Image (cartoon, rainbow, N blue to C red):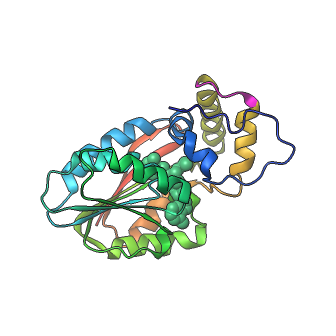
Amino acid sequence: MSKDQVYSDSMANIADFSFDAQVADVFTDMIERSVPGYRSIITMIETLTEHYAQPGSNLYDLGCSLGGATLSMTRGIAAEGCEIIAIDNSAAMVERCRKAMERCHTCAGVTVREGDIRDLDIQEASVVVLNFTLQFIPPEDRFRLLEKISAGMRPGGVLILSEKVIFEDKHLDELLFDIHHDFKRAHGYSDLEISQKRSALENVLIPETIPTHRNRLLTAGFTSVDVWFQCFNFMSMLAVK
Ligand code: GEK
């Protein structure tokens, strides 16, 4: 696995973060050292897929990056006749994700598409994964996207929504922000790397509170919504149709 050193040298100007080839080349190392609980969520997506995938249905990995969640979904499917659609709008990610799927023995039913998840047609879905992707969608587009996902889901299907979050309680918000900083330092990032990456993400990754996510999912048409995993200021929710 190539080591993430994208922000290790001092930069005069810090451009907005983008999922380009430089990021795609080190993405697995970057996300594992930056997102507390990422590996646990990826592992549990296999178990959740086994539980929720319905025969003859579609499964979607929206913002698939290199296909980490897609691979877990392929391992979890026990139902017959399922298809997986993995989509990302970064050409660099899609190219590498396609290569990973070619090397994988459980991935025959996977189609990898390059495109914007806001334009994707979603139908007959039993499992939809938004694993740290919604936070990169402009806030004004989030409700419409979730409503479209809900409308394209079968009853009893599930959306797995993982996000970085903020907290209404100011003390807790600052505490978990600092602890996340400590997590990154403990995983080998310098203070310079942490602060330069934070500046690059400032206008690109917009986190929201857990109640904001919960209320919007309920309004978008999901019937049962709650957090199933949380580690510091990173969490994952299940939203059942
Ligand atoms: C994982 N789910 O490893 N349309 C399609 N893709 C998009 C869009 C969009 N509008 N906006 C952003 N992306 C993955 C990790 S990373 C999370 C997801 C992170 C894509 C973007 O190109 C990137 O690959 C992904 O969403 C977000 O389980 O880096 O924190």
Which stretch appears magenta? 187-191
Q: Residue at x 71, y 27 (%)?
A: 190
Q: Residue at x 60, y 49 (%)?
A: 21
Q: Residue furthest right?
A: 12
In this rendered view, identify the residue nearer to me: 198 or 172: 198
Q: Residue at x 34, y 67 (%)?
A: 222
Residue 12 in the figure: left or right of residue 187: right
Residue 151 horizontal/vertical position (percent): 33, 76
* Residue 27 visible here: yes
Is residue 190 found inside the magenta-colored segment of the image? Answer: yes
Residue 229 in the figure: left or right of residue 8: left
Residue 171 horizontal/vertical position (percent): 65, 39
Relative to 149, is 26 above or below? above
Residue 64 horizontal/vertical position (percent): 44, 55
Residue 50 horizontal/vertical position (percent): 20, 49
Relative to 5, is 17 above or below? below
